[in-house]
Amino acid sequence: MEITVQWIRTSWTKLSRGGDAAARRNAVPTGFPVSQVPPSFAHFVEMSEWDGFVPHESVKDLGEVGVTLDDEGDRLRVLAGEERVYGMPSRSRRPPAVRLSQGQWVRWQLNYRFSGIGHGDWSYWLDTFNVAFGPVEPDVFLSEPTVLVDECGPVR
């Protein structure tokens, strides 16, 4: 079974909640080209306010990525995990898992907010999981996904 996983984490503080800084944050990509990633690994891209949202790419073991992938024969079951963080946006109900057929892919987004211990300032992050089932081109995640799951809640 051929699976391609890309995990993008974008992090920021209140400094990037308005004006030019928010425009830069909102302009970060939700998909990147994927190079050859070994099986059981994911393409990881991290961007943060602290360095101007410059993408830093690496490879992560699939066990570190917050998605559950289940082989159902001719379909792939995908479910994004949810970090339990104090102060996270309310999500009254989680969507069900997505089942992909060969050649399909899902983009699943979740956002978080948390308080810095001792600082009192809020910090935020957005996790984007792009998961493709079957052989794909390196630029697959630059196109529109077959399925989009947007679990982003309000962040004050």
Image: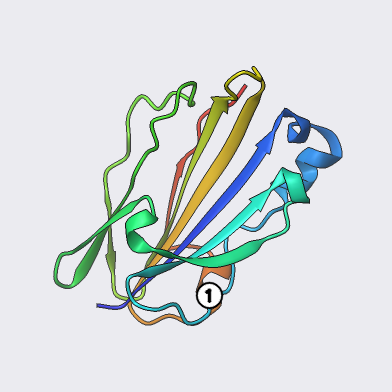
Is residue 121 rendered to the left or right of residue 148? right
Tell me if I can see residue 143 in this picture.
no
Say which residue appears at 34% left-offset and 77% top-offset: 39
Give coordinates of residue 59: x percent, y percent.
48, 68
Say which residue appears at 54% left-offset and 26% top-offset: 114
**Residue most extreme to the front:** 118
Is residue 85 rendered to the left or right of residue 40? right
Q: Please, is residue 140 above or below residue 148 in the view? A: below
Query: Which residue corresponds to mark 1?
Result: 34
Quarter of the image for residue 15 reads: top right
Say which residue appears at 74% left-offset and 32% top-offset: 17
| Dot 1 crowding, Cα within 10 Å, few <14, some 14–19, many 20+ | many
The C terminus sits in image quarter: top right
Nearest to the observer: residue 33 or residue 102: 33
Say which residue appears at 53% left-offset and 80% top-offset: 35
Give coordinates of residue 90: x percent, y percent.
44, 23
- Mark 1: which amino acid? Val
Give coordinates of residue 29: x percent, y percent.
65, 58
Quarter of the image for residue 1 reads: bottom left
Is residue 52 rendered to the left or right of residue 37? right
Q: SS for tag 1?
A: loop
**Residue most extreme to the left:** 73
Tell me if I can see residue 91 in this picture.
yes
Please give the count of numbered marks on the rendered protein.
1
Query: How was this image coloured?
Result: rainbow
Q: Please, is residue 45 above or below residue 94 in the view? A: below
